[in-house]
Each structure stands twice: as structure tokens, then as C-alpha cells.
Image (spheres, rainbow, N blue to C red):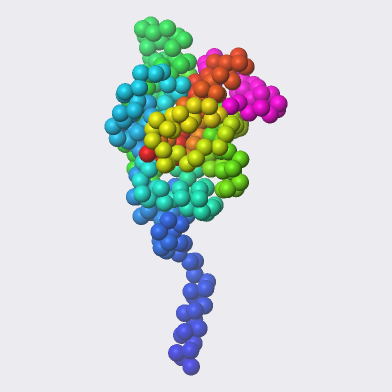
Amino acid sequence: MNINLHAWLKGAQSLLAPSVPICLSCGKRARLSSQLPAICTACAAAIPWITRPRCRKCGRATGCPDCSRSGEPSPIVCNRSAVAYSTEMREWLGRYKYRGNERYAPVLGAMLDTAYVMLMAEMEQLLQEQLLQVNAGSAPEGCITTAHRLAPPPRSTSADRTPTPPSGSTAASRWQADLLVPVPVSNARLDERGFNQAERLADVLSRRRGIPQLPLLVRTHHTAKQSFKSRAERLADMKFAFAANPDPAMRPMLRVAVNAIGPLERPLRIIIVDDIYTTGSTIRACAQVVSRLAAEMGYDAEIYSLTWARS
């Protein structure tokens, strides 16, 4: 009788006690990260964050021959990515993008937000330096409105903490994006997956930062998976793959979004969002179309890009 009572009490306690959550990545019961939903602290600590990019242009964590050997001007100010595209990160994206595990959407979105915070910190540091030059009379006042060069990388950050903007920022030196533009997928890819992963990532960032998102772009034709192609093939493939969204409501929506910002004494800051930056051909093709569209509507624009991973 006592044994049965003990067993019953033990079973009741297990039902009433809070269960230890299961990590989305490793499948083990463990304490979860405070920054990433459904990811345990051990898996979060192993994430290959890019906290100090070696290439200031494309945000690559290692040496980048592509940017150094290219003599062509880039249509983007810079790209920043949250993580290096390691084997584990490839698995995470595969579970979400190809196997439809929706629980990864807020995780990847929160990680992209980390890259956005890093971009803000860099640009605010740059604006502060330019503002100091203006106040010292060593630079024209107009230089604080445009990111002509990149600031040094921010100080290193831990794996479970997002970077913080530089201290002492002023209203003139605060930097934030004005608009997010996701890279579109073809109708065939949309039918295959049921969603556009870049749009989902932009959704998370939009909600977190209060930045409007607009589908300014459409894909003009379906392209085969880029992971199987050489750099030259990707560049050729992407050259005419995108166009401005022909929806008649799109331009009025863009004007409404810009007017909501208020009077601008600087270029419009537009961020193109995608999941992976490999050769940059997709981002550059999108940036060229967005830049032309902004110019046609009378806006001076700076184009940036944020990607979840950098290969």
C-alpha cells in the first residue's frame, strides 16, 4: 500500500511539475536561451556568429577575394550577416526552408535582428565620427547624411547577447533603416515551399524594429537552385532575374511609407533582406532595381542588405 501510494505521489508530482523544454535543434531537454526561442543554451553557444567581419563590404567572416578583385562599383553600401553558413546552420535552414518546420521562423528572424543591431552600431559610429568632423570644421555638413565609408567593426560580443549601439549617440547620429525589401521567389518556388523565407525573415525584423516592409520586387523568371552553380553562372543567372513590382498600388504604398518618416535631409535607407549571401549576385541584382525605382520616384537612396547567413 505504501509502495503504491509513493508511486502515485511521484506520478502526480511529475505531472504537476513544470516540464523541462525540448531544444528545437538538438532535441534534448535543457535550459533554453534567453535570446533565441526554443534553442537551448548549449546550441546557442555553438552558433557561429559573425561579430567581426573580415570584409567590410560583404560582411564575410573570413578573407574575401570577391570584393577585393572586383573593380565594379557596388549598388549596396554593405551587407551584414548574422552567422557563417556552417554545417549546423545549413541543417537549421534546411529544416525550415525545405522541410517546412515553421518553429524555426522566429529563431532565424531573431538571429537576423542581431545582424541589424550590428549594422546600426556600425553606422551610428560612422555618423558620430562624421558629426565630430563637421563640428570641428574639417568636413562639410552634408557628409553626415551619407555613408561614404565604413566604420571599424564594433567590439566583440557574446553568443547569447546582441550588440549594443555606441554610447553617447545623439539625435543626429542615430541610424535606423526606413524600409525593408525582401528578395522575391518565383511562383514555382513559392508553390513548392508554400512561403518566401526572405519575406518571413523581414516580417520578424519589421515587427521587432517597427520598420515597414514592402514587396517592391518580383522575380521575372524561375532559376534553378543557385547552390549547384559556379560564381560565373550565378552572376549570369541573376542579371535579369528581378524587376520592379508592377502592382499599381506599390508606388503609392512606397510614397506613404516615405511620407510617414517625415522630412528627410538624408538619403532613404533601404535594406534588402535574404536568407543567404553567397556571391552577392542576387543582392546586387535586387539593389540595382530598387535603386532605379527610388530614382524614378525622386528619392535619393542608400541600399544595404541583411542576410541570415554568409557562406
Q: Is residue 92 magenta?
A: no
Which of the 4 quarters of the picture holds residue 130?
top left
What segment is highlighted magenta in the picture? 243-271
Which of the 4 quarters of the picture holds residue 203?
top right
Q: Is residue 265 magenta?
A: yes
Q: Nearer the viewer, residue 255 or 151?
A: 255
Residue furthest out toward the bottom: 1
Look at the image and tell me whether residue 128 can be seen. no
Task: Point out residue 19 in the picture as x, y percentages from the top left corner.
Answer: 48, 66
Q: Is residue 186 above or below residue 102?
A: above
Task: Point out residue 262 in the picture as x, y percentages from the top left corner.
Answer: 61, 20
Look at the image and tell me whether residue 278 can be seen. yes
- Which quadrant holds the C terminus? top left
How many labels sit on residues?
0
Q: Would residue 258 appear left or right of 103 to someone viewing this image?
A: right
Q: Nearer the viewer, residue 191 or 308?
A: 191
